[in-house]
Amino acid sequence: MNIAIIGGGLTGLTAAYELTKKGHQVSVFEKSQILGGLAHGFKEKNWLWPLEFAYHHFFTNDKSLIDLLHELDMGDNIIIKRPITATYISNSINNTARGNNFRISHPELSTKTNNNNNNQRVAEQENYFTLRSFQNEKNIFQLDSPLSLLQFNQIPIIDRLRTGAMLAFMKLNPFWQPLEGITAEKFVRTLGGEKTWNLIWEPLMRGKFTDLDTTVAASWFWARIKKRTTNLGYIRGGFQALINRLERHIKTQGGQIYPMSQISQIIPRQRGLYDLKIETDRTGKQKYDNESPRSSSGPVLQQFFNKILLTTPTPIAVKLMSKLTSNNVTPRLSLDSARDRRSGQTMKQFNNMLSIPHLHAQLLILETDKPILDKIYWLNISDETFPFLALVQHTNFIDSKYYGGRHITYIGNYLPEGHPYLTKSADQLLSLFKPYIQRLSPNSKFKILNYKLFIGPYAQPVHQLHYSQKAPQLETGIPNIYLANMDSIYPWDRGTNYAVELGQKTASRIQSLALI
C-alpha cells in the first residue's frame, strides 16, 4: 500500500517505522522543519546533547517506549534515576479561594521589554536540603512517596492517612470506567478529605485546568496516579536521539519524510484513492524546501495514496476531514440513504471531537550559571497567586555537563485559547515570572544567561466526564482515513510512551485492514 502520514511527531514516526517494516510505501509530511512534535530538541553552542522544547522523562513501567528503544539498539541509552519531586504550598488557605487565581485573572502585563534580563541576579545565600523542607523555604515540601506524605504535617494525620489510602486505591485499582462518571474534585474530597483537597489538589487542578477544573473526570486523576513511578527515565542524547534513529530506519526501510510540508487539503480520487495538497503562501509559492515533494502541477502532489493517517491535533485533523464530507467536495458520499446516514454519523463524531477542550503548553526555558533549585527536579506550584504551574530544574535530573555546564530550568504553564500570556514575548514573561522564581529560590545567587519561549498548541486535552464518548477513534467514518493523536489515548494522559504505543497499534490496525 501507499500510505501518507500527516504529522511527524512520535506517533506518526512510530507508525511509519512499523509500516515500512511491513514493506509498505510510506510518506510522512511534517509542517515544521524538525520532526518529533513536542519531543523535538534544540542544541546550543558548546552543548553535547540537544534539549527538548518541552520537559520530557518517562516512567520505568513505560513498556512500549522502553521496548522500542531496545529494538532500535538504544537500550544502552536508557538512564534511570530517582529525582526529587516537591510541591510549593501556599502559606495561606485564603490564597486557594476561587477567584484568586493569578493566571486566570491574568492581570495586565507590562509591554516593555528589558534588555538587561541576562544580567539580573537574586540575593546570595547558602542553599541547604532536608527531606521535608528545601532551601530554607518553609513552603516547599517533598511529596513523592508514602513516607514524605506521612511527614507532611500541614494537614492532620487522619487526612494524611486518608490521602495515602486513596492513592493506594488508585495504584491497585485496574478499573477506570466507573470513575469517568464522577469528577476528580468529588472523588478526592470524598476519599482524601476536604483539607487535603483545599491545600494540595484544588490549587494544582485550578492551576492546570483553569475554569475547567471542576469538570475533569476522576478517571484522569486515576491515570496520573496509576502510572507514576518514583524512578524516572531519560534517553542519553535526549529524546532527539530516538527521533533521529526512527527517521534513519524509516528512510532505510524505503519510507520518505518531507519536512516543511503542511497539508492544506486531502483530495479524493477514483477507486478510493487520495491525493494531497501542500499549503502555499500568499504569493502562491509552495511552502516546502528542497527535500519536499514536487509535481509539475504545483502544490497538488499527484501521488495517489491508498490510506491516510492523520496524527495532527484534533481541530486541525477535523478541519481537513470536514472538507471531505461536504457535498461540493465528495458528492459520492451521499449516493444513497445508507451513505447519508454514515455521513451524518461522521459529522456527529466530528462535532463530538471538536467539543473536547484543549490547553496550550507554554514553556519558558532558562539557562543559568547556577541552579535555581537545590536538589529538586520537579516543583509543583500549589499556590494560585503564582503566574506559572511548575518549575522543572532539568539539570537536577540530567547532569549539566551535557549542556556546557549551564543549568536548565523550565517554567511551565497550560493555558486556554485566548489567554494573554500566549501573546507575550519571552522578555515580558520573564519580567513577570522573576519575582516568583526568586521566592522559590530566596537563598540562591544565579545569573540568567539565555532564555527561550516555546508554545505547543493543543498539547493537553481536558478529560471531562464520560470522555470516552468523545475520544477520537482510529477509523473516522471516511473510507481509508484514520486519526491517531494524544486525544485518542484515554484514559491515559499525554506522554511519549503512549505516542509510541498508539503508533504501533495504529500501524497494526492499518496492516490488518489491508489484508481484508
Image (tube, rainbow, N blue to C red):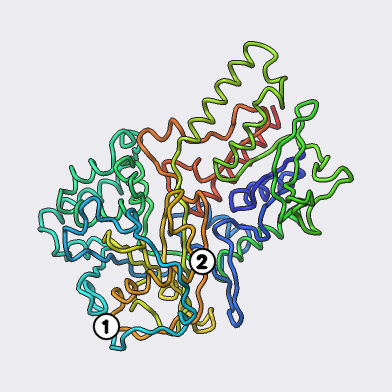
What amino acid type should be assigned to the residue bearing mark 2? Answer: Leu
Viewport quadrant of the N terminus:
top right
Q: Position of residue 222 (x, y in %)?
A: 33, 45
Mark number displayed over residue 453: 2
Disc 2 to disc 1, C-alpha distance:
30 Å
Q: Position of residue 62 (x, y in %)?
A: 47, 54
Secondary structure, mark 2, is: strand
Give whichever of 333, 511 is nearer the camera.
Answer: 333
- The residue that mark 1 highlights is 128
Q: On screen, 151 above or below 374? A: above
Viewport quadrant of the C terminus:
top right
What amino acid type should be assigned to the residue bearing mark 1? Answer: Tyr
What residue is at 32 percent from the left and 46 percent from the top?
213
Local crowd size for mark 2, using a 10 Å CA cut-off: few (<14), some (14–19), many (≥20): some
Q: Position of residue 419 (x, y in %)?
A: 43, 53
Residue 423 relative to residue 439: left or right:
right
What residue is at 45 percent from the left and 38 percent from the top?
356
Q: Say if mark 2 contacts mark 1, CB within 8 Å.
A: no
Tell me which corner region of the image, top left, top right, bottom left or bottom right, holds residue 238. bottom right
Of all residues shown, which one is farthest toward the top?
337
Tell me which corner region of the image, top left, top right, bottom left or bottom right, holds residue 435. bottom left
What residue is at 35 percent from the left and 38 percent from the top?
176
Residue 250 relative to residue 98: left or right:
right
- Which circle's residue, 2 or 1, is located before the other in the chain? 1
Q: On screen, 248 above or below 452? A: above
Mark number displayed over residue 493: none
